[in-house]
Amino acid sequence: MIIKKIILKTLLFIIFILSYSPQSYAEQSLDQQTLMVYLPSAFVALVLPYLLFTIYRLRRSRKQLRLSEHRLKSTVEGSGDTLWDWNIKSGSVLRINDKYMMDKNATSDFPPNKTLIHPNDVANVALLLKQHFAEQSAFFEASYRIKDSLDRWHWVLDRGKIIEKDGNLNPLRMTGTVRDITQLKSTEARLNLFAKCVESLTDALAIYDKDFNLVDLNPSFLSQFGGNRDNYLNKPFTLHGYEQSYIDEIKNTVKQTDHWQQEVKLRNSERKLLPIEISIDEIKNEQNQICNYVIVYSDLTERKKAESQLHNLSNRDRTTGLPNRNLFFTNLKKLARQNEHHALLVFDLDDFKKINDSLGHQLGDSLLAKLAMRLNKLTREKDVFYRLGGDEFALVMSGTNDIHTITRMAKQFLAAIATPFKMAGHELVITSSVGIVLFPEDGNTPELLLKNADTAMYHAKKKGNSYLFFNDTMNRQAVKRLQIENLMRFGLKEDHFEVYYQPKMNIRTGKFTGMEALVRFITPKKGIISPGVFIPIAEETGQIIEIGEVVLNKSCRDVKEWLDAGLFNGRVAVNLSAKQFSLPDLTTRIDVILQKNELPSYFLELEITEGTVMDDPQDAISIMRSLSARGIHLAMDDFGTGYSSLAYLKQFPLNTLKVDKAFIDDMKTERGRNMVDSIVTIAHNLDLHVVAEGVEQADQITILKELNCETMQGYYYSKPLSKAEFTVFLEKQQSESALSLVHQA
């Protein structure tokens, strides 16, 4: 284009020279001819250098322009910005380094393409552009979200300015840049989030510079300590009420360890002294240099209150308010470490379960609370009264081992416990027994002391409503008792419980009528353990239930075998313990055993002690009727040894009354004979069969015959026999019976 202009100007110059002359036409013609001869040379001499120089300048300008464009492009690409040039009149948009997105041929009402802006941001962008067009802002500047070619949203900062207007000052052209600020927005959002978190912290927070001068704080700081922001800014770190030496020590510790934390006492905005936990941490910059310190002030008031409540919950009994078992062991360990003499009194309430069962646990808990208040008033200032659990309590008398002082306290406790309680229309009388141990004589650890105190209490219960000091004999007995418990547990697992059978004989005919099943505990190492030893322990531990089921199951199994062999046609009597009798599913358990062994209920007789049925006669009647309805015979064992009631006796659905061995042994006296006579008479009047147990002498049989007693069992006729021995006995009975029939024939 420029070359064309130069050539055109040169031609015009030549024409001008040819046309301009004042001479005649002939002269002009001559000059023109001359000029035409020299013109090419003149043109070459004059114009060509100019043209060459112009072309050189043109090429150099183009090179510089390309270089400038390259630099501009590199700069734009390096900046990451998109440049745009908007021809407002035509609506076309020129974009450089357009990496977002947009259709290259698209037009829009405003940059960039409207269709790519997030719908929620369109209105704001339009408003800002409108304000710039109205010259209300020097620049158009907007942050908004825009979609790229992969349909991903980016935050961008769009800045532009009108650079050309028409005569009426209407905008014609506008240029600007678009920058991706997604990362910046993310960082900004995080910073805003952290700022809001700091501001919303319930803990007071303060930020100090590297010299421990305050530079910022959160609202909770002012709420906690009062004042206004300006009162604190640029002030050095301090703790009111603490010496400067302590503050300096804190600073030195933080610089050495990067962290410091401790509980202090500070006054709040209401001048109330509060427990405050201070935590100080250092902040470092990119060069790993300390630039700030962050201090958090945590009010521990609620936490201390919660800890106190938790301590009470974990160390106090909720029903009585007394210290509990946990605190008992903790305090006793402290006393042991101090090596201070003290006494431990342990007791529980006799038959407290009956109160709970009959009157309800709520009344039982109220009774325990009243008892605790009553006994707590009796203790000395140094004594501590504990509830160990259930109805078990303990008193620790520290600083004394004086027997007189200790026994006086034990007597006062027993008297206070035995004093009736009037509750809910009831007058409740309870008793207890107290076991006493001394430290360090009876044990040097809380566990050993409590174990020995329990042992002493166990022995005191045998006397009833009394106290007893621990001694070595008790310990040996307790150890033996524990050994028996373990042996029984192992014996049940390994089937060491056997059933022996003692025959029942008709007194007048001497014929075999039935037998009683008796349990025998035969251990591999200890041999036979007497029922008098293990049965009381089994009743206390509850193992008697499992033992009783073993006996009942084996008895039914053996009887079924003898019935099938034709050796037996009578009943086997099996004892029911008090714990078995109180089982809610007793009848179901018996049904299962009978069905398993395929034994008809007719061949089973259950013996129940007098004391068992008299604990709750009405309930006993219900259970006994349920058993009787199944065809099971019922016998009352040990009649006359307890607190018999004839009024109830006639209501019990019994079949047999057993006379206890104690009465049989006493028949050599007239009084004893009369007692047995009365029992037999009562039984016959109630249409009950009578069995005398423990018969060992011939004269006893003579008397029993005179008193019309039908059946006897005892060593006079046979000791209890094992299954194998009893099988032989039955075979012998069968042979004798057959021989007798032959003689009769």
Image (spheres, rainbow, N blue to C red):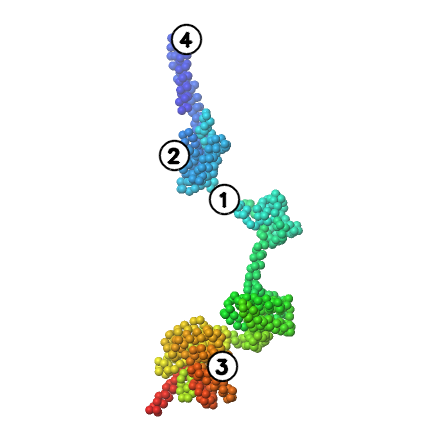
Amino acid on which the number 1 mark rests in the picture: Ala
- Work out whether residue 614 or residue 736 is closer to the camera in this orientation and state it: 614
Callout 2 amino acid: Asn
User: In what element is the residue under mark 4?
Assistant: loop
Real-space Cα separation, disc 3 to disc 1, in angstroms:
92 Å
> In the rendered view, does 37 fall on the left or right side of 395?
left
Amino acid carrying mark 4 in the image: Gln
Contact, CB < 8 Å: mark 2 with mark 3? no
Is residue 410 visible in the rendered structure shown here?
Answer: no
Please give the name of the residue rendered at 55% of the width and 45% of the height, measured from the top-left corner: 285
- Residue designated by label 3: 640
Query: Based on the displayed image, in which of its 4 quarters is residue 59 positioned?
Result: top left
In terms of image quadrants, where is residue 570?
A: bottom left
Sort mark 1 into few (<14), some (14-19) or many (20+) by Cα contacts within 10 Å: few
Say few, some or many: other residues with alpha carbon within 10 Å of mark 4 (under 14 / 14 to 19 / 20 or more).
few
Between marks 2 and 3, how big is the CA–CA gap? 118 Å
Per the rendering, the mark at residue 105 is 2
What whole-number distance in Å separates the C-alpha atoms at marks 3 and 4?
182 Å
Q: Earlier in the sequence, mark 1 or mark 2?
A: 2
Is residue 202 among what the camera can see? yes
What residue is shown with label 4?
23
Residue kind at label 3, given as amino acid type: Gly
Density class for disc 2 (Cα within 10 Å; few <14, some 14-19, many ≥20) is few
Foreground mark, 2 or 4? 2
Mark linked to residue 189:
1
Separation (CA) of disc 2 from disc 4: 65 Å
Which mark sits nearer the N-terminus, 3 or 4?
A: 4
Tell me the SS state at disc 2: loop
